[in-house]
Amino acid sequence: MQGEVIFWYCNKQQHNRGLVMRLTKPTLFTNMPVTCEDRDLPGDLFGRLMKEDPSTIKGAEALMLGEMLTLPQNFGNIFLGETFSSYISVHNDSTQEVKDILVKADLQTSSQRLNLSASNNTVTELKPESCIDDVIHHEVKEIGTHILVCAVSYTTQAGEKLYFRKFFKFQVLKPLDVKTKFYNAETDEVFLEAQIQNITTSPMFMEKVSLEPSMMYNVTELNTVETGDEGTSTFGKMSYLQPMDTRQYLYCLKPKSEFAEKAGVIKGVTVIGKLDIVWKTNLGEKGRLQTSQLQRMAPGYGDVRLSLEMIPDTVNLEEPFDITCKITNCSERTMDLVLEMCNTRSIHWCGVSGRQLGKVSPSASLSLPLKLLSSVQGLQSISGLRLTDTFLKRTYEYDDIAQVCVVCPYMSRES
């Protein structure tokens, strides 16, 4: 127990006293071992003293960590996401009995006032040298100044109603610094990188860091390495985050099928989801934070979007290969499209250029298989596709759609 505050009220022959203490777990006792070599002047004096010290570990006296527990000597820090616990005791110091005692504990934050009392019922009587005890708990969800307001009302034997209260002020600090980055892939996938930094002065055990996706997405965590049937965390078995250290978590989000088929749905600012972070500190004290809904700006594709559904990684020089394109109407009107294929220095399209693709309704899409070949080795960029809307006489150009590695299938052998 730590952070003791005693308050009292005196009136005539009545003397009532209240006690407020913050409840927290103790810490492991540490000492500073002093050692020397046997040939030094003190000899084995320091070793014998450490063996006689009751706070050291028998057989490992040179370790700083001891076997005893230490009660904190000050109020300590309270961090966002932790549970604030406090012990409240009201003691009757007088020689007379009091009646109808009501003890209330409220927590005032910058935005609201919360009632933390376990019971709001009055106690019928409180005899001399007796006390009323209460333990309150509250999960801290706001940073900044918090004021614990403890109020006591009672009635004397003469029928006089008395009241007193005390304010207990403390600060709630931020334990983690969370930064997020979004990366948009051509396949409608979204990669989220979350950087989490421990900005407290003590290490944390990161019990869970997960992403709760919104209704539009499915999420895959990319923070494990598959080894056999089970995955191993990329951070190792002991997931500790030291003070001021930063750890990066990666997630892949894919639109659900019902949303991926509707190109017009995923536009502008979209809600991705929220991070759920759970950690433990001194002797297993748990903290939990949930971020607000993470939002990202969906990339703009214009009226018509062209994406690749299938493309080989490696192809042979001067041999035709197949790709599959997906054309999506992202506008709010029907389009009548014509496909033109323009050859480049290295890429040559196979097929008829200028063919009609037909009408495409708003948010609808069509798959387009194409054949082409490369006349130059190396990493080649696929370019030269043109889509023309005959209704508005507007042409959309698509270059650098993807890249493919072109290799020579013939290997020369030295005789």
Image: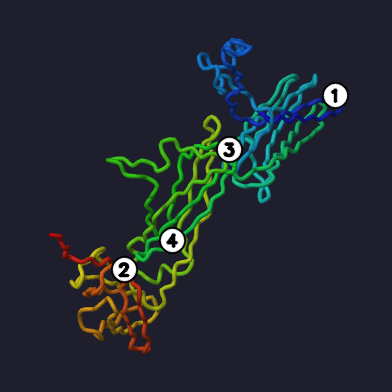
- What crowding class fits label 2: few (fewer than 14 Cα within 10 Å), some (14-19), or many (20 or more)? some
Return the x and y of residue 265 as percentages of the image width and height. 41, 69
Taking the spot 47% from the left edge, 69% from the top edge, the residue there is 268
1 and 4 marks in contact (CB < 8 Å): no
Q: Is residue 113 left or right of residue 356?
A: right
Amino acid type, label 3: Thr
Write down the residue under mark 4: 183
Alpha carbons under labels 2 and 4: distance apart: 19 Å
Q: Earlier in the sequence, mark 2 or mark 4?
A: 4
- In depth, the one of 129 and 212 nearer the eye is 212
Q: Is residue 301 visible?
A: yes
Which of pointers 4 and 3 lies earlier in the amino acid sequence? 3
Q: Earlier in the sequence, mark 3 or mark 1?
A: 1
- Measure the C-alpha gap from mark 2 to mark 1: 91 Å
Residue 1: give its label: none
Residue lying furthest left: 415
Tell me whether the residue at label 3 lies in contact with that at label 2, contact meaning CB atoms closer than 8 angstroms: no
Give the amino acid at mark 4: Tyr
Q: Residue 303, position in %: x, y?
A: 39, 78
Residue on which disc 2 sits: 403
* Residue 257 in picture, x, y percent from top left: 32, 62
Q: Image height check: is 118 above or below 98?
A: below
Q: Earlier in the sequence, mark 3 or mark 2?
A: 3
Mark 4 residue element: strand
Choose mark 3 or mark 2, whichever is in front. 2
Q: CA distance from mark 3 to mark 1?
A: 39 Å
Q: Residue shown at 24%/70% (left/top)?
A: 323
Mark 1 — residue? 13
The answer to which quarter of the image holds residue 375 is: bottom left
